[in-house]
Image: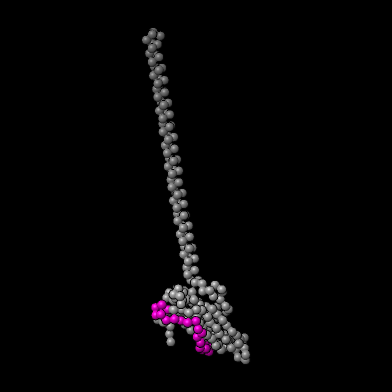
Amino acid sequence: MALPEGITTAEVSFGGSLDVLGTVASITATVSLDRNLVWTATGDELYLIDSNLTDNEGTVTFDFPHCDQEGFVDSSGATVTAFSGVFKAIVDFGGDRTITVVKYFQVFVGTDELDLNLVPDGEPTVAVLAGVDYITLLKNIQAISNAANTTIDQISADATTASNAATSATNSATNAANSATTATDAATNAANSVSTLVGSLMNNLQIEMLMSMGF
């Protein structure tokens, strides 16, 4: 028996349950999906039904589909990319010493192995029970974050450009003011030179007039 062609999986394991004296517990366990799924590539439907797992010296191991892979839809045809697995086990140490374990879990694309001993026990949150697509939600949050960072970077770049333009304009205005000051000084010097020349000419003319009059 095998899953339909094209479905990628990770190896999931649970076991190694010991008491304080090192007694290895036997495990009676099942695994199921949290909803019915259809694999669109082949049209096969995976049902929400418990599948029995085989205890191998106190450990159970099974392959479970990656929950964020593309290709799964629900019975309405809506894309599903965040389904969960439901693991239930009775851990039996003998002598009426048993522990019931329930774990909801997910394995993502890129994950090869998952140790259920490291997954907290208990029911999932209300959001998980409602089938919230966490993968898409996280991707949307990341996209919004990236867009915000891009906007901030663009605003920063525009501000830098505006600042540089303002600095350039200020420098140009300063240079223009300095040029105007230089021109004004040159005009003043020229006017002073002309005034001095006129004064000199007037003095010479007065001397010549006095000499012509016999003084």
Residue 56 colored in magenta in the image: yes
Q: Residue furthest bottom?
A: 95
Provide residue 43's location: percent of width, then percent of height.
41, 80
Residue at (38, 13) in percent of width and height: 208
Q: Quadrant of the C terminus?
A: top left
Provide residue 86's location: percent of width, then percent of height.
53, 80
Residue 209 colored in magenta in the image: no
Provide residue 48's location: percent of width, then percent of height.
49, 81
Query: Can residue 214 be seen in the rendering of this structure?
Result: yes
Provide residue 191's location: percent of width, then percent of height.
41, 26
Q: Nearer the viewer, residue 106 or 149?
A: 106
Question: Which quadrant of the view contains residue 177?
Answer: top left
Query: Can residue 68 be seen in the rendering of this structure?
Result: no
Is 54 above or below relative to 192? below
Q: Quadrant of the N terminus?
A: bottom left
Is 180 above or below relative to 194? below
Is 129 above or below relative to 187? below
Number of marks: 0
Residue at (44, 81) in percent of width and height: 45
Is 71 above or below relative to 174? below
* Position of residue 182 in the picture relative to residue 84 (left or right): left
Q: Nearer the viewer, residue 184 or 105?
A: 105
Q: Nearer the viewer, residue 62 or 124?
A: 124
Q: What colour scheme has been applied to the protein in the rendered image?
A: one colour
Residue at (51, 84) in percent of width and height: 50
Q: Nearer the viewer, residue 207 or 141?
A: 141
Give, as a single range, the part of the protein colored magenta: 39-59
Residue at (52, 78) in percent of width and height: 105
Dominant SS type (magenta): loop
